Image (spheres, grey):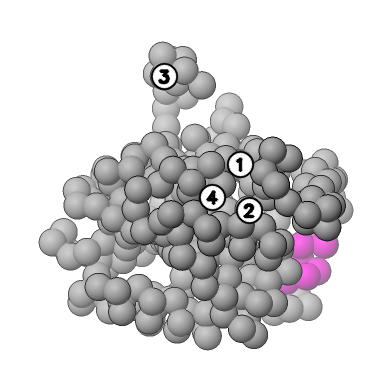
């Protein structure tokens, strides 16, 4: 959307500020900003926050637009532009001035990558976890990878169109797997979920953005991740600033082992 039209829209539909679920404080500390995934909340980061040193870092966890305790405005596309606009406004309110480390899980990784593409001077380093990257047809890939990508995208379209089916089954999966955060689609977040799914995850420019980034990027995923196409993740290994790490024996969720390994990666580089 051209900047002039964005300006007009923001006059009539103001950009909402997000709910800050956790802020350990300290304006002079290196800040770490945490962005959760779709149908989740800032609770995604509970285990990681325990592993990080709040005395050394300022740790900030947000509820993304449409989820948790953040606003659920109408009139928005819930695309990557909308998400980063609300993130950016919130971080400005928190007076985070020095370049920060941004950590995004699943859809949060897509949003983090887009934030870097628009506000590159604001970010020092990126950690993208369980990144659901789906490659365009113009990027060389095997027939198997292309077929799997098409199946995922068709499944997402189905979920976005079938409200009752999606809500009922998300709650069933949560009960079976005893998930504390994530895969929580309900009446309150349905609009944000369906639009974020189609306009941020399905319609993404993440590969191109990561191809052009100027900061270090660490992509971390579990060997058992059920939402990833690992062949697509491996395509990112050849990019200039990107490092890819696989954690054996973990899935899509940020469990105890995932959090521990990730914290070591973040702290060990500082």
Residues marked 2 and 1 touching at CB (< 8 Å): yes
Where is residue 151 shown, x and y percent of the image? 84, 52
- Identify which residue, 192 or 101, lies in the foreground: 101
Q: Residue 3 carries which label?
A: 3
Q: How far apart are marks 2 and 3 (CA)?
A: 27 Å
Q: Which mark is residue 133?
A: 2
Residue at disc 4, secondary structure: helix
* Residue where numbered disc 1 is placed: 204
Residue at disc 1, secondary structure: loop
Relative to 33, is 199 above or below? above
Query: Upstream in the sequence, badge 2 or badge 3?
Result: 3
Query: Upstream in the sequence, badge 3 or badge 1?
Result: 3
Residues marked 1 and 4 touching at CB (< 8 Å): yes
Query: Upstream in the sequence, badge 4 or badge 2?
Result: 4
Query: Upstream in the sequence, badge 2 or badge 1?
Result: 2
- Residue 207: say if magenta: no
Q: Which mark is residue 138?
A: none
Q: Quadrant of residue 115?
A: top left
Query: Upstream in the sequence, badge 1 or badge 4?
Result: 4
Q: Distance between the residues labelled 3 and 1?
A: 19 Å
Q: How far apart are marks 3 and 4 (CA)?
A: 21 Å
Residue at disc 2, secondary structure: loop
Mark 2, Cα crowd under 10 Å, few <14 / some 14-19 / many 20+, is: many
Segment tinted magenta in the rendering: 167-174
* Residue where numbered disc 4 is placed: 110
At 25% from the left and 73% from the top, the residue drawn is 270
Where is residue 215 shown, x and y percent of the image? 34, 53
Residue at disc 3, secondary structure: helix
* Nearer the camera: disc 2 or disc 3: 2
């Amino acid at each position: 959307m051209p900047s002039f039209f964005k300006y007009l829209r923001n006059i009539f539909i103001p950009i909402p500020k997000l709910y800050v679920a956790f802020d350990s404080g300290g304006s002079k500390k290196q800040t770490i900003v945490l962005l959760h995934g779709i149908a989740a909340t800032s609770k995604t980061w509970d285990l990681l926050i325990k592993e990080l040193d709040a005395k050394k870092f300022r740790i900030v966890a947000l509820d993304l637009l449409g989820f948790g305790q953040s606003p659920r405005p109408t009139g928005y596309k819930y695309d990557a532009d909308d998400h980063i606009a609300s993130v950016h406004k919130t971080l400005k309110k928190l007076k985070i001035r020095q370049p920060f480390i941004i950590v995004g899980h699943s859809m949060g990784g897509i949003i983090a990558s887009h934030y870097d593409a628009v506000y590159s001077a604001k970010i020092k380093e990126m950690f993208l976890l369980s990144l659901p990257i789906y490659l365009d047809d113009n990027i060389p890939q095997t027939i198997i990878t292309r077929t799997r990508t098409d199946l995922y995208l068709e499944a997402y379209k189905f979920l976005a169109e079938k409200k009752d089916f999606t809500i009922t089954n998300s709650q069933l999966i949560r009960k079976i797997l005893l998930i504390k955060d994530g895969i929580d689609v309900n009446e309150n977040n349905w609009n944000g979920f369906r639009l974020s799914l189609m306009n941020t995850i399905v319609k993404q420019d993440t590969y191109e953005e990561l191809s052009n980034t100027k900061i270090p990027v660490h992509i971390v995923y579990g060997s058992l991740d059920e939402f990833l196409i690992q062949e697509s993740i491996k395509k990112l290994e050849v990019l200039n600033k990107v490092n890819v790490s696989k954690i054996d024996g973990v899935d899509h969720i940020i469990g105890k082992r995932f959090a521990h390994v990730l914290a070591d990666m973040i702290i060990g580089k500082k």
